[in-house]
Structures are given as C-alpha cells and as structure tokens.
Image: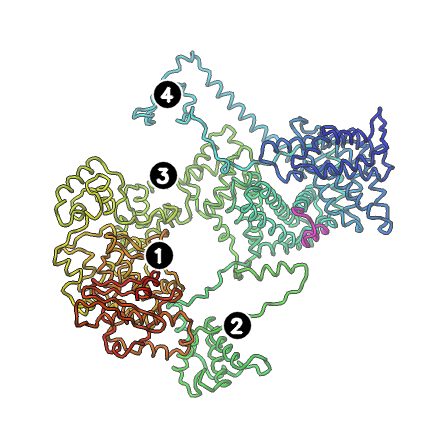
Amino acid sequence: MNCEILATCSALGYLEGDTYHKEADCLDSVKDLIRYLRHEDDSRDVRQQLGAGQILQNDLLHIVIQHGQDRALFDACIRLMVNLTQPAMLCFGKVPDDPVFRHHFLEVTSHLQAYKEAFASERVFGILSETLYNLLQLDWEQRQEEDNLLIERILLLVRNVLHVPADPCEEKKVDDDASVHDRLLWAIHMSGFDDLVKFLASAQSEQQWSMHVLEIISLMFRDQTPESLVSAGHARSTEEKQRDSEELESLRQKEHAEKRSRTFQRGTRHSRFGGSYVVKGLKSIGDKDVIYHRTLYNFKNYTHDVGKAVRRVPKRNRQALECRDKRRSALNVRLFLREFCVDFLENCYNHLMHIVKESLIREQAQQHDETYYLWALSFFMAFNRGNGFRADLVSETMSIRSFHFIERNITNYYEIMLLDRKDTTSWSRRMHLALKAYQELLLTVNEMDRSQDESIKQSSSVIKSNIFYLMEYREIFLTLLRKYDETRQPLSYLKDLVESTHLFLRMLERFCKGRNNLIVQVREKKPSTSEPTPEVLCENDQIVSVFCVQLSESLTESIVPFDATSETPLEEQRVEAMVRVQDALLARLGPEALGFLRAAREVWPDGDVFGSADVEPEEELELLKQILHANLPRSTPPEPVVEDDDDGAEFEEEELESVQVSETEFKFLDFIKRFACSSIVRPYILLLKSYSKNSPHTNHCIARMLHRLAVDLKMDGLLFQLSVFSLFNKILSDPAAAAYKELVTFAKYVLNRFFSLAAQNDKAYVELLFWKNTRAVNEMTEGYSKEGLVLFVLYVVNVLPDIVETLLPLLSSTRTRRQVVAQLVHLGLVDNSKELKKQKKGTRIVLWTEEQEHELQMLFEEYKDSDDVLGNILKKITAKRSRARVVDKLLSMGLVSERRELYKKRSRNAQGKSSGKGMTEEEFLAELTQDFPGESVDRDDEEDESEESEGEEEEAEHEGEESPNGIRRSQSFHSTAERRPDVGTVVNSLRQEGLSGPLLWLQNCLNVTAHHREEDGFSQPVPLVPLTEANEEAMDNKHFKKLLRKLGLRAPANEQETFWRIPAKISTSQLRSAAAALSPREDEPKGAEEQERSRSPTAEPQEEEAVSGEQRAQALRALLLTRKRKHHNSKHTGTVCVRIGHYHCFVFATHCSHNAVFTEDDSTIAMEANTNSDADSDREDISAPVKRRRKMVLIDDEEDEINDSV
C-alpha cells in the first residue's frame, strides 16, 4: 500500500473489541481518501489498495454504526462508501481485453464481493433505514439540499451493494440455501428498508427518486422468477406434479437405455476375439471396403471422423452464450419477496410505472434506464397472472401505448446490435428483455379474454383489434424470426420468440373465427413517378374514349374550377385546373375529368387552352389524351400542423414514412403462408435440436408451427432437408421417445410423405441437399418445368465450362444470356450472377511447357525470313495465346533482341502509299475521310463499358492478323460496305456545338504523338489528359467520344484506366491523316462562325479563353496557307511572319519540308476560329491539309529562342 494512503487509513481510528475509537482528524482522513480516489489512474490502484486493506469492513462500517450522530462524518463516510462500491464496469468502462487490465478488473470485482458480504448485516441497514426515515419525515420546506444529497447517496449505496455480482465458485450454494444476496435481502427486510422503498414508490411527493427505487427493486428480484415466488408457501399443484413425474420418467428411460448399452459393450468372450468384419459398400481410404475390428453392437455409430481432431469453430461463428441460470432462494426470503410483490402491485405499481414511463418518453432518464422499466413490466405482470389475476392492478401498462413503446425498443435494439458489433451481447440481452415484455403483454391480454367480467373482455377485444389491425404489431414476429442470428442471440431468446409467435397466432386465429371479415392495414408500394409505359397509356386512352362517349352536357353544372376569393393568381389556378383533369383521368374518373375540362373552358375561353367553344367530341377526346400524357407542374401540398402533445413524436415519424398503407380484408391462411420460407423454418429446426432440454410447451409450439406449414398449407416439401431428417432420426431412435409423442408422430408423417414422393420423383433425394423456397417445393412435388429441369440437371452435373452458353440452344424459346442467368439465380442454383460471368475471349494460359517452347522455337526458325514472322507463328501455334505473350516468350528465349524485329515487313508500294508519296494533299484528304484508323466494329454509344473493354482486348489480341486476302487489318479498318460517315460532318457538328477548342487540342495531340513516334522509332499507347475545363467537358460529350472512336482512339479498358489513349498500332502517317481530318472542310461557309455567334446574343461577352482559342485556331490556319506560297527560287530559305491578333507565327519554309513553329499563351484554350487574315490568305484554300511528311509541332517551352532567332 502507498505510504500516504497507509498513513491516512491509520489516522481514521482503531477497533478495540466491539468499540471503534476514531481519531481526532478522522473526518479529514475520510476526505483525503475521497480525494485520492478522484485522482487514481486507469488501473484503479487506490481502489485496489483500499480494498486489500479492508478499510470499508474494518473502519467505515464501524464509524457509520457507532458514530452516526456525527452528521458531517456520517455524510463523508457514506460518500466514500458510494465511491468504493461503484460497479467495476463503470470504473473500467467495459470488460478490458488487455490481460493486465483484465486482472485489475477481476481484483476490483473480488473486493466488491467482499464489501457485499460485509453489508449483509442488520445493524448496517438499521442505521441506514433510521437515517433515511428521519430525512423522509421532513417536509419540503424543512428539507435542505444536504438532506436531498444524503437521501440520494443512501439509495445509491444500497443499489451499488445489490448490484455486486455473486461468485458461485466461492459461495457454492445450492437451491433453497441462503446465499450472500439472500442474506443481504433478509437484512433489508429485518431493518424495514423495504417498507421505505415501497413508500418512495407510492408517495406523490417523492417522484424524483422513482428511477433509483425501480433499480433497487429490480436488483432485489435479480435471481427470482415470478413462478417460484407465486408457488412459495403453497403445496404443489397437480400440473407441477405431473410435469415432474414426466421428467422423472424420461430420465429413467434414458438411464435404462444407457445400462443396456453398457451391457452390450461387455461381450461374453475376451476382447481379443471381438472379430473383424468387412463393411460392404463403405469405402476406406483406398478403393477397398472398410474393415471393422470392433463388436457389432456399436456399428451404427461408426464414422470416418473417429479419431480426427475436432475442427475449431471461429469465434464469430460460435453460438451465443446463455445467461446464467436462475436459482431458488431460501424459503423465508421467497416468502418475504412474495409479500413485497403483493403490496407493490396493490399500492405502487401503477403510480411508479406511470412516472417512469413519462421520464423515459421525455428523455429525463439516463441511458439504458428503459431496461428496468421493461423488466418490471414483464416480472410483475407475470406475478399478477399467477397470483389470482386482477386487471386493475396492472392497468397502467395494459394499453396500446405500451405495445408501441416496446415494439419501438425492439426495433431500435436490433438496429444498434447490427451496428455496434463490439457490444453485441449487451444489445442482444436488451432485445431479449423487450421481447419478454411484449410476450407478457400478449399473455395478459389472453388472460383478460378468459375473465368473467364483461368489461374486462371488452377491453381485451379493443386491444386485440388494434394490435391485429396495425401491421407493425402483426408482423413483428415474422420479422424477428427472419432476422434471427444464432451467433448473436442465444437459444433462450429463440425459445421465447417461438412461444410468443405461437401465442399470437393462436389469439389471431380465434379472433378471426369469431368474425365474418376482418379489415387490417397493409403496406403498399408508392406509385412510381416515372413515365407510364405504352401499355398503360394505351389502356388509359381506351378508358378516356369509353368515358367520353357516355357523358352529357349536364356534368358542368356542379363543378367550379375557379375560386375568385383565393389569393392564387389566375395563371396558377388554370394550371391547377389542368392538373385536376389529369388526376381524374389517372384515377379513372372519366365523368369528373370531362366535367372539369368543360367547366374550365367556360372560365378560360381565351387561347383555346381547354378547347374552343364549338369543339367536336373527337377533338375533345384528343384534348383529354394530350392532358393525360402531359408533364404538368405540380405544387407540393403544405405540411399539416400537428399539435405538440405527448404523441407528437409518433405523428412526425408517421409523416416521414415512405410507405403507403391501405386497408384490406384479412385472411388467416394467407398470413400463415408468409411463414412458409426457409429463413423461418431454420430457427424452428435449430430450436428443435435441443428437444430433450426444451419444455413440453416449447416442443408443442415448434410442432404446431411445423404442422401448420406441412399439413394446413401442404408445404411439407419445406422440411425435405437432410439436416431435418437427421434430427427426425435422432428423435425416433431416442430411448425416451415416448415422452415426445407429438414430435414422433409428426416426424413419421413427414418421412412417409417424402418416401411416397421419392417413388414418383427420383430427384427428390438430390433435393434433400438444399433448403427450398415455395416455388422449388411446388416444382419438386408437382413436376419440373422443361426449362427448370434442364437447368437443374446441367447445374448438378457441372461438367460444362460455360453452362449458360450450353443451355441457350437447348431451351425451347428464344432466351438471352441475361434471362438464363437470372433464372439460375432465382432457382437458387447459384448464389450470385457474377459466378456465371461470361469469360473474355482469348486464353488464360500462362505457363509454357517444354513441348510448347520447342514448338515455338521451330516455328520461329521456319518463318524468321518471312514478311510477317509473328503473324505466321500465331496462325500455326497449337496452344493459342495472345500476341503479347508470344512476343514476351520470344524475347525471354533470346530468339529476338527487340520487339521491332517482329514487326511486319512492308513492300515498297505499300510503304510509298502509306507515307503519302505520289499523292497530292487534296487526294490524301479525300482518301482520309474514307480510310482512317478506327475500330473494326461499330459500337453503339450506349454500350456497356465492360463489353467495350472486352472488344478492345479482343482487338489487341488479334492485332496483326491478316484477312483472307492478305491485307493487314490495321491498314484497312473498314470494307467498302462498312465505311463510316464522313469525319468532316462530325467535325463540323462539333464546331457548331462550340467544341472548336477541344478539336484543336486533339489535333495537336495527334501531331505531337506522330512527331515523337517518328523520332523514337517505336510506338506505345499515349493517354489524352485534358488539363482545361473545356477539354474535360468535351471528353464527357457523347458526340466527341464518337469522333474519338472513329479516329481509332481507345476508351479506358477497365477501372484502372481513366483517360482515352492513342493506340500503339496507329502509324505516324495515320496520325497525321487523322489530325488533318480535324481541319474545316472546303465547303464550309466562310462566315459560319460569325453566323453562329450572331444567333446567340450571349456569345460575344464570353470568357477571355474563347477569344484566345479562336485566335489560336486562326493562327494554325494561317500556317497552312503560308505553306502553299510557291517561291521562285527552290533553294531559297526565308522566314514569313504572320501576325493575327496577339499571336506571332513563324514559318520556316524550305524546298524539302515546312516546319511550322508558333508560340501561344499558356492560359488559352482552343475554340472556334474567326477568319481574320490578309486578303491573299482569304483567297487561298484554307482547308488544304498538310502533307504526310510535313511536321507541325507546338513548342511552348522554346518561345524565347524563336523570338531571338527572328
């Protein structure tokens, strides 16, 4: 112990015999200890040292008992004891995961258990009761703030002591024996403290202590059950005796079966002569049958798993742990608690529950305090049912508000349990507590229905009408069964859920039998706001036609579409009138719609909006159809004002709900059909596995639900599952099967139904492997459809590489791949459509065998002198691989040193033509619009990205292959019949859309890429990275993407690529051809840009970027015109400077080549050009292309050098 703490504890006083002598500075020492506790560390070292020193047992309790008249010292000791008895969970926040802190946590808990044993004294509670009684005798005018603090601290101290958990390993008490908790309760009773608790619960002036009182009461009854308290002091009833005798008989039968089994184990001969047997049909590790070396009595339990290590179950998949079992306290304690319950119900229950409920609704309580309310509701209502039911004693909690409060808490607990995974156990227990409270409400309503008092029966009928009418209460058990998770919720929760569902269905069935029809609330989907389908529009048109024929002029007499007193303008009222006509048509109220139309025509005759005065019936019909199909503006209605009352929050939640509800006639059998699904049957089967531990009532609830499904609904196929049959076999072979007659009878019925079905359907045995839905059950019992049978058989065989492609030609009707995949998923044969995703064309072979490497080497030696080495190898190789993999393998084997050695060799004619020799610029431009690089197949603009990437990958793999006539695909992208539209038309349309700048940017990218490829001597894909906002918007434009595809550019292949790319397969000549094709056409009107700008009055005050872009485009055109000027001296070299706007374009002209270099402003973007050159340039052909051998390079970084050279 710390020396300072030790000195402080020594200064408190000392015990001599039974007398405690306090020191002079005892009060200051107590205050010092309080200060030490306030500044303790995370390991709670001060608390542990004080617990180890037993300060509370040896000093504080004696000071309180013998020196209680010292008010200041008494208050300080109570304050210190409240701090010391604080629960360990509050000290550490949670159960620590760290081993060191877990040790500290257990140490603090052990000290608390020692404190609890010390408090089990009548003298201690006698002093506390006397002090509390004196304080409660004071009126509010006389009571000081210190008095209220002392009252609260005494209540907290008692609560903390009662909260300390028991240690069954140390106590080792059996039922009917007095534990530490029982002795503490007896001390409370003998001191009269329980009477003070009942007074605080019933007094109108002590409402502020209601939550503390409820906590103390709940902790007092922590180990008790209502049934054990009701039966305390009474002789056992006939039902209890019968239940005990049945349990004893079951145990006797099991013991007899075990004795008989042990007798068979001891053979008459020596164990060495047990014998060896060959098990026919049961294969061992090899191909031979199993040899069994034991006696035959236990052969039915033989399995291959004998001797194997038990497979460890992951922690996240383990079944949730059960709460600790209840124990039966000593008889005198149970009698005292029984009397306490009776007095509490008669005098305190309704008052206290009302106050606590109001505090919870107004959020005046602390977090999780509603759990005490839920416990008190379920405990005391259950005690009231067993102890001579009186409805008036629990009238406060018997209302629809209680059902709603509990239902909301169940939903809230479930949602938080899914989110807070670290504290799943706590939220699961709270959810279980709320379910118990809901179950108790139903049991009380059922008990009220049996009452002899007609008023109580009428109240029960009203409550049942409400809970059966509202879908929230009617479907709560259906939802909870579907959402059950055995890894988070224990079997005790499932047991209560199954029993509550059984009770609810039984009450609902009786309620429906006594009425001819029952109207309930159902949930419906809101009508979609999307456009109506053509079928709906056609149907509405027919309805409008029929209505208009049956109408007369007398409909307009009682319809007034105009409100003269309204503040709404006339125009808005006219639109509202048209909306009313449309709403009437959509609601199929033809007479009202035509009446609104004719009345509105009389109010607004101007403009013939609602038709002219002498309109014909046919024209009137056509006008109604137009209004029906029109997209009219609708104003949102104002939100209704709700008064601020107790249920205000509930009304607001109902307004926010997105579902639409309506009323319909309830049919009990249709409601039971909703339970016919595997997600609900599985929890019942899981609970049935513990049939030997279940109560007879629980087994009856399970059997009754399965009987409803298998017999009433004739859906016994839901139970045709291998795990269910294994469980039935276990029940039938149980020695105590006589105690489970109902389960045995039901199991025999289901098995007989299955074997009779298996005689007709030989695939029923395969169906045992799967849980089935209703559709699968119907197909299994009534026969498979042709398509379903084909899908099922081929899936089970599973010998096809692509089952969907195999199924398509086998189906009777024309089906798409997507429909077949959807059907497989719907039948449950596959979990996800991704499992049947179509494999991309090509090969997935990665490894090369020695034979394949030798074959590749032989093919290379054979075709290494040919014009197309790689193409010939790809044609002749046996194991088809992609072009890139073959090239990589040739490089790794050392057959070639670089990739360019594998390029296809071209003839001189092809080279001359591809390089542009022997062709004029006009001929080249004319040819460019017909034969330019692009993709081999036109794609639709709305095609999926995945299909697009697959097509591009397929092109990449087959790149370089030759067509049947020997022409390379990259040279002839389209046949004559498949040529694309003129590129110039697409370019002109984009220029009219204002995309001249992005077009010029694309042209520059193509020219720069061609220049780099010519200098480097090799090609690689080049991404198009838009750096300006205009270029980014253009890359998202549908028509601009279409142009990129026509030019042969590649879209992003997958999610790892972001930008479009210039493929490596496009040559430099083709790049320059594509760049030249982006220039304006010859027949383009000279003033098209001016006309376009004149049509849009807001074009001139555009941003400064547009002006700079136009000047940049004009500068490029001036370069093209300057190149055309013929110089008389072919060897003369000169410099022509053209000034357009603020751009300087320097053209260095030679006889052999023309290098155009110009500078530009960094901040400009390309826009539509404005012809502003000199007179000579205007007369030139501004759309003439550059020759393929000419180079155009935009050099921004060398601006200074160019200016210096000029």
Res 609 → quadrant? bottom left
In primary-sequence order, the first of circles 4 and 1 is 4
Q: CA distance from mark 2 to mark 4?
A: 84 Å
User: What residue does disc 3 label?
Assistant: 765
Q: Residue 6, percent across and down?
A: 76, 29
Q: In the image, which is nearer the foreground, mark 2 or mark 3?
A: 2
Q: Residue 213, percent across and down?
A: 74, 44
Give the magenta part as a residue range. Answer: 354-370
Identified by mark 2, the residue type is Ser
Q: How many marks?
A: 4
Q: Residue at x 44, y 26 (%)?
A: 309
In primary-sequence order, the first of circles 2 and 3 is 2
Q: Is residue 492 magenta?
A: no
In primary-sequence order, the first of circles 1 and 2 is 2
* Residue 1042 in view of the camera: no
Res 171 → quadrant? top right
Q: Secondary structure at mark 1?
A: loop
Question: Which circle marks residue 635 in the picture?
Answer: 2
Q: CA distance from mark 4 to mark 1?
A: 69 Å
User: What residue does disc 4 label?
Assistant: 292
Rate crowding at label 1 as few (under 14), some (14 to 19) or many (20 or more) other CA atoms within 10 Å. some
Q: In the image, which is nearer the foreground, mark 1 or mark 2?
A: 1
Q: CA distance from mark 2 to mark 3?
A: 61 Å
Q: CA distance from mark 1 to mark 2?
A: 43 Å
Q: Secondary structure at mark 2?
A: loop
Q: Residue 443, percent across and down?
A: 63, 46
Looking at the image, residue 652 sits to the left or right of residue 23; the answer is left
Q: Are marks 2 and 3 in contact (CB under 8 Å)?
A: no
Q: Is residue 366 magenta?
A: yes
